[in-house]
Amino acid sequence: MRRRWVAVDHPGWVQAHASTVVAHDGDVVAAWFAGTREGTPDNRVWLARRGPGAAWGRPVVVDAGRVARWNPVLAHGPAGDLWLFLRRGARISEWSTWVRRSADGGRTWSEAVELVPGDVGGRGPVKNPPVVAPDGAWLAPGSTEEWGERPRWQPFVDRSQDGGHTWHAAPIPLDRERLRGAGAIQPALWVADGRVHALLRSTEGRALRSSSADGGRTWSVAEPTGLPNNNSGLTVVPLPGGAVACVHNPVAGDWAARCPLVVSVSTDDGRTWRQVVTVEDGVTPVEDDPFLVPSPPPAAPAFEPADGGVGTDGTGEYSYPAAVVVRDTLLITYTWQRRGIVEALVPLAALAPRPTTEGTP
């Protein structure tokens, strides 16, 4: 495995977070938001790119304004262009989703337009990219967050049958009688054997799972899996051969430590998982800067969650992964101590099922 900087300790920000990544026309394009801290008005969406075998280019700002920017999501559009979804708003509960399009692989962008006019709370993808359903519809994994004395989080999937022009939200049901916390958010979607599956970040110490048999129109009640979740973002990528990889922090608890960062693999559509690779351990330096040493998480991570964003100094945090398969490699980007974004390259061979002593996988 190789790890290298996309960007770190840039003069344009104090904290950087929530990267997204896509392979497009032979290049790799990544975006993230960065500013003083989550929710401050100076947060902008930044973007960088690299060619095959090349170093990452200089980051540039692609969206900025008078209110905070959050959670960019890059995706291939139905017409083959590149879409950049992003959130705008001073508070999570009030943010709205905007989109820019690029016909030249992210070098230039259209003016931003609201994805759903009048949106309050966020439509479309909230962290992970859309997928194409078996019937050709575009499915965007979304969620809303109500804060206050008793926070309430609700996941859903936005469905578009006209190339992203109009959207119809389908809730992912939660059994709230069994929940200890606010709920679940930020689904990650994948398609297998004619069904669509979702893996969700939750407040329950474990990731939740839901499925749809009708192209994302309706969803099963989200059930707990054995995959630990620390109430932090995860991502899912189908692998050649039918398995699926999840990049996540293998830590149970609500607002628990965001270290280490690992890849787990499932061969039964997300019901069970096996941890196979450690991407970040909080000890090993990134290879192109051995003097910038990471830090393990503190014994009691100091996250201060609020509607205006999560407060943290970033110590020991390696989180919010994005991933894409590029030829024989799983390419991952993630937040590094809120100071920057790292790219990790994991050979797909390292994720293959391992035979037991009896010779069966």
Image (cartoon, rainbow, N blue to C red):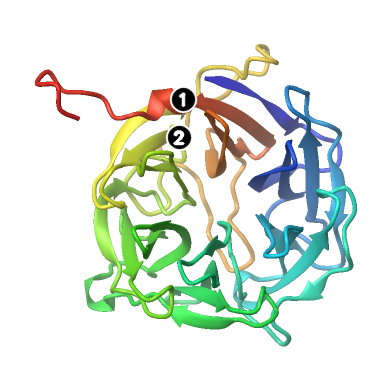
- Residue drawn at 30 percent across, 68 percent down: 222
State the image quarter where residue 223 is shown: bottom left
Write down the residue under mark 1: 281
* Cβ atoms at labels 2 and 1 below 8 Å apart: yes
- Residue drawn at 46 percent across, 59 percent down: 189
Residue 233 place in picture, x, y as percent: 49, 52
Residue 57 place in picture, x, y as percent: 84, 32
Write down the residue under mark 2: 259
Question: Can residue 146 be seen at all in this image of the molecule?
Answer: no
Residue extending farthest to the top is: 290
Residue 126 place in picture, x, y as percent: 58, 64
Q: Is residue 50 left or right of residue 324?
A: right
Q: Compare marks 2 and 1 and give the one earlier in the sequence.
A: 2
Residue extending farthest to the front is: 135
**Looking at numbered disc 2 in the image, what kind of residue is underneath it?**
Cys
- Residue drawn at 78 percent across, 56 percent down: 43
